[in-house]
Image (spheres, rainbow, N blue to C red):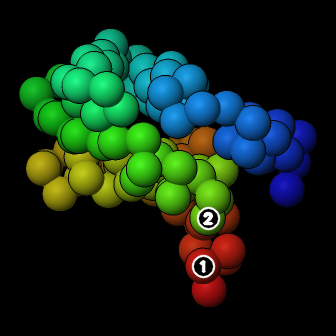
Amino acid sequence: MNTTGFIRGYIAKNMTAESFINVIIEALSKEFQVEVKINNISKGVYEIKFNNYRVNLNDNLINELKSKSPYAVDKFLLSELREQGFDFDERRSQYIRYCFVHFETIEG
C-alpha cells in the first residue's frame, strides 16, 4: 500500500463518521469533477447528492464500513451510484482502484 492508502487508513480510524464522510465527499468531487453535496437529514443521517443521484448513509453504517477498509464507504457509495445508473471505469484512477481492488483483497 502506498502512502495515500496508509494515510486514509489512519484517517478512517481516527475520525468521526461525520468528519470521515466529508473527506469522502471531497475525494469524489475531485475525482469526478462534479459538486457532491451532503445534507444532514437528521442527527447521524446523511443524504449524499451526486448529480441526479441520491444515497443515504448513517453513522452506524459509515463506522461499520470504515472498520472493514479505509475505502469501504467510498466503494459503498460508488456501488449505490452505479445501481442508480452512474457509469464509471473501476480502473480510471488509483483512488477508484483502491475502492474496488484493495477492498476485495481485504474481504477475500
Which sits in the foreground, 75 or 86?
75
Compared across the picture, whether 78 is left or right of 98 comes to left
Q: Is residue 108 visible?
A: yes
Q: Residue furthest bottom?
A: 108
* Mark pair 2, 1: CA separation: 8 Å
Q: Say above or below: 24 vs 37.
A: below
The residue tagged 1 is 107
Name the spot of residue 92 as percent of width and height, x first.
51, 46
Name the spot of residue 17 as percent of width and height, x first.
52, 35
> Residue flagged by tag 1: what amino acid is it?
Glu
Q: Is residue 89 visible?
A: no
> Residue flagged by tag 2: what amino acid is it?
Lys
The residue that appears at 56% across and 24% down in the rendered structure is 19
The residue that appears at 51% across and 58% down in the rendered structure is 64
Name the spot of residue 3 as percent of width and height, x first.
89, 40
In front: mark 2 or mark 1?
A: 2
Q: Are marks 2 and 1 in contact (CB under 8 Å)?
A: yes
Report helix, strand or loop for mark 2: helix
Compared across the picture, whether 62 is left or right of 43 comes to right
The residue tagged 2 is 68
